[in-house]
Amino acid sequence: MSSWPHDPAAPLTRRLLLIDLDWQDADQLPSILGQPGVSVRLVAGQGPHDPGVRMAELCDLPRTLDLADLTREIFDLAIVGERSARRAQLESLLQALGTPCVTPEDFLAGHDESPAPTVATPVPLPPSGNASLDAGVEDLINEALPTLTEPAPTPEPSRLVTPPPAPRIKLATLADFPSPEVRAGFEEALRELVASTGAGSAELHAGDLGEIHLIAQVGPEDRLLRGLIELANETGTPQVVTRQSDPGRGLTWAAWPFRTMQRRGVLAGAAIDPHQGMDSWKAMIEDLRDTWDREDRQRSAVAYPLTPVRATGWLDTQAFRLRIDLAVDRMASDGLRFELHRLEFPEAPVALEAFCATLPARLRDTDALCRPFPQVICLLLAGDERSFAALQARALQAWEQAWAQSGLRPPAMPFVDRHVALLEPGDREAFRTAADVWLAER
């Protein structure tokens, strides 16, 4: 794919994503491109002969057949073909990514609610296509249309489905997480916790896997507590301090961090009587973690592995098991194919460490990677058989390069690739069992 030209000195434009356009939608492409203040950053389709993809090739627009590419750049608005057979799936994915979506007709009629564009640096995509827009979009498309005579496939009458209206999705803000009602509930819970444990104040901070913000507070602000909150969030470990001097001699200041798949938080209390209810504070942390983790899993399953906030690189076994569960739930919802691989390596520690250092960069950011034992690597991959074959080839190439760079005599000793596929609902238990066994046995 090639990059759409952009002048950094020009005013900010809305970055558009076009998905699954049919011939009727493609006829409106000149009008879409002619709208002021827009830039088509990517065109996606299901196959190389999709009308939208062919039009994008003619116009030298960035294009892809892989939905994973939707996560590599921020888009202000997605225009989804009204007659797309996978429209419901795409809307769920775009909602998880926080991208509003409309039909081409709604966009041209001005019925969209995309937010103001923000500055972002797109990831360059591989170039393809030779046509340019120098002659004008209208002339180029009019010239090319006579050669594109294949009729678009028509669904059988019994399978025609009227798509629902495109939802009006707005990007969530911090004020939306949690809602004012939920914030009030948090404050009430903190108030009861403070009263029952004799604490002076309490704070709850939460956010995504990056920055956290104050969600609820009861009592006055405490400078010591604020420092403990920052330290707990930074280190990921509880910070507990008992005062040995007045005022507050014998009382405890504490900040407990917790984390779910999509969020992290810190619950903190000042001037707690350590003999009157530390267990109550820990119980509230467990309740928060369990509730938010359950919500995260319910929201993430429909979009996995394209969840908007996800850890990349090496995962611990607990995080990897969670992704196994999400893969099973996602396959049950729409049949997306997954494979689990267990790679078993020979005794060559120098080569294996070199291999592990480069492997994450050779995988997609939607792939899950775990090393439960020094000689064992587990991979969870989503996609079709061609994607798996390409990833296997890259892994083999990385192993051979690591072997050679370690000064070992070629050829590289082979590694064992044990794998199981998740193709249909009947495979779910076998898939989970394989994951449990492979993550436990050396």
Image (cartoon, rainbow, N blue to C red):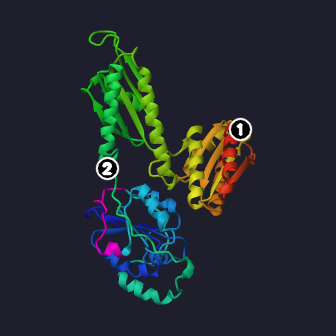
Seen at 31% across and 33% down, the residue is 188
Near mark 2 (Cα within 10 A), the count class, few <14, some 14-19 or many ≥20, is few
Q: Is residue 202 above or below residue 395?
A: above
- Left/right placement of residue 249 relative to residue 210 reads left
Instruction: Say which residue label 2 marks.
Output: 173
Q: Can you tell which of label 1 and label 2 is closer to the viewer?
A: 2
Q: Is residue 442 above or below residue 2?
A: above
Q: Which mark is residue 256?
A: none
Q: Secondary structure at mark 1?
A: loop
**Of 231 and 106, the residue lying toward us:** 106
Q: Is residue 113 magenta?
A: yes
- Residue 235 visible in image: no
Where's residue 122, x and y in %?
Answer: 40, 59
Seen at 56% across and 58% down, the residue is 333
Where's residue 93, x and y in %?
Answer: 46, 59
Q: Which residues are magenta?
A: 105-120
**Of 31 and 397, the residue lying toward us:** 31
Near mark 1 (Cα within 10 A), the count class, few <14, some 14-19 or many ≥20, is some
| Quadrant housing residue 77 | bottom left
Report the quarter where the C terminus lies: top right
Pick whichever of labels 1 and 2 is earlier in the sequence: 2
| Quadrant housing residue 272 | top left
Where's residue 185, x and y in %?
Answer: 33, 38
**Of 69 and 185, the residue lying toward us:** 185
Where's residue 217, x and y in %?
Answer: 29, 32
Q: Amino acid at mark 1?
A: Ala
Q: Amino acid at mark 2?
A: Thr
Instruction: Say which residue label 1 marks.
Output: 348
